[in-house]
Structures are given as C-alpha cells and as structure tokens.
Amino acid sequence: MTSLLQTPGATDLPTRADDPRLQNWYHTIELGNGLVSRGAYDHRTIVDRYGIPASLRGKTALDIGTFDGFWAFELERRGADRVVAIDVATIGDFDWLPSIKAGLGAAADRTSNFPMAHAMRQSKVERMICSVYDLSPEKVGTFDVVFCGDVLLHLQNPLGALIRIHAVTKEIAIIQTSVESEIEKKHADRPWLSFGIRKLEKVLGAECTYWYFSTHALKEMMEYVGFSETKAQKPFGIPPQGVASTSVVGYVRP
C-alpha cells in the first residue's frame, strides 16, 4: 500500500476564489478561508442522508474511492481518531473495459485534487493507493467505520468488491450507490440491477458506468457477503443533478 499524497507547499495553494485550479473538480469541497472547489457534485446538503454516525470519536474510518476527498474529510470532521482514504492512482486505473482504456490517451494519467484539498484543509487524513479489489486486513488493516460512495456502479465486479469491504469492516459499513428509479418504484421488493447506460453513451462503456441497483439488491448483496444486518436509509438525490441514490448501512455483529 503506497501513499499517493504529495502535498503542495503553502505558496503553491490557491488564495483567490477565481483561481482556475478550483474549477472542474469532482467534489465540491470547502477548503478554508472562504474558498470552495467547483465540483460536478455537491454533497454538502445531504451528508446526513447516508447513515454515517454523527460522532466518530474514538473510531477509525476508511473512505473507499475517495478521489478529491470530500467524504474522507467529512469522516475526519465527525471526529474519527484516524481516517484512511484509498483510491487508485490515476483515471487510467479505473475499472474500464479494455477497449476504452486503450483509447484514453493522456486522460489516463489524470489524478485527483486530493493533495491540494488536503493541504488547504490542513487535514490529517492518510491517503493510500489501493484498489477496492485489493482491500484486505493485511494490506490496510480493519476499521470501525467503512464508507463507500458512488463506487459500485463503476465496478465490473461489485459483489467481489463488497466481499473485500466486509473483510476490513469491524463495526459498520455505509454503502451508497445510484439506483434505477423505475425498478425502485415498481419493484422495490426485488433484488434487481439494471445494466449499462447505452442511451447516454456514444461509445459503449465510455462512462465506466455498469450497474444501477435497487435498494433491495444492495441490501441482499451486503447480507450475502456477511453483514449480519442491513438498514436502508431514505432515498435521496445528489445535487445539483439530483442523481437518484440509495444508501445502506451494514452491521458486523460478534
């Protein structure tokens, strides 16, 4: 497990809201001194919809697929004694279809804005290079609270990922993902998944988005991998687009 964090020096950090380095982030993050990144998604108004305990004091926490780091910093803000944030090193390491990965070109080398956000927030979160598929107690240890948001839909093997997540969870895991609204409304009692977003892609697989879950499907998958109890949160949308989402808390009982 290798650290990806190369923290910029204080003189290299943005100090003005119009700094172009604050544009085109994935996450909208409050960075201190009134500065906010301009992200594609803004989770700030929905942080309490996921099922994360209000206080994490005395707990260790893991953020899976952290990218720019919004959720890792939220776990830290809630008082966790230690927060580890994992992700792959570059965009090219996402779970692409081989044909798409071969055509990424220079985009494959793109990294996240985590180091800048970490420095500006003066955070103590530990950032590690690790795929969800490689999670194990031997590699990363185990954590009281594990968070995984907007990852499963981008994975070719979400069930395998959940097996790995369960292996490093000591108490609870919070798993959030996108839902297929029609299935959720008409067949809420079915463990169904919808595959692909063919209508939204000019090239199949170009968005690295494979699965939309029903809440029932996510609950059952989590129970299959060993979570002794699961509790679904109320459905919600992610601003600004309102992407339909579900979040399930899984419990590990002695």
Image: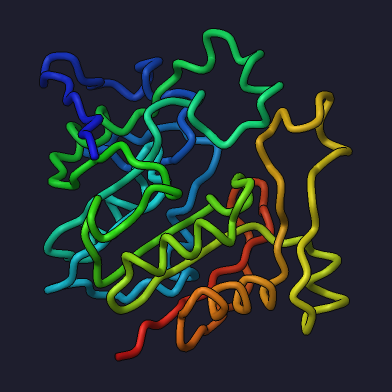
* Res. 151 in view: yes
* Along the viewing direction, whichever of 202 and 14 lies nearer the viewer: 202
Q: List the single residue furthest toward the top.
A: 106
- Compared to residue 200, the image places residue 6 above or below, namely above
Q: List the single residue furthest toward the front.
A: 138
Residue appearing at x 63%, y 78% in the figure: 220
Quarter occupied by residue 177: bottom right
Q: Classify residue 111 as left or right of residue 220.
A: left
* Along the viewing direction, whichever of 56 and 94 lies nearer the viewer: 94
Q: Quadrant of the N terminus?
A: top left
Q: Classify residue 92 as left or right of residue 6.
A: right
* Residue 194 x/y as whole percent: 80, 58
* Residue 17 x/y as whole percent: 34, 24
Residue appearing at x 24%, y 65% in the figure: 142
Q: Classify residue 190 as left or right of residue 48.
A: right
Q: List the single residue furthest toward the bottom.
A: 254
Q: How is the image coloured?
A: rainbow
Q: Classify residue 90 as left or right of residue 9.
A: right
* Res. 33 in view: no
* Residue 188 x/y as whole percent: 78, 80
Residue appearing at x 20%, y 33% in the figure: 120
Q: Quadrant of the C terminus?
A: bottom left
* Residue 154 x/y as whole percent: 61, 45
* Along the viewing direction, whichever of 162 and 51 lies nearer the viewer: 162
Q: How many marks can you see? A: 0
- Compared to residue 189, the image places residue 6 above or below, namely above
Quarter occupied by residue 244: bottom right
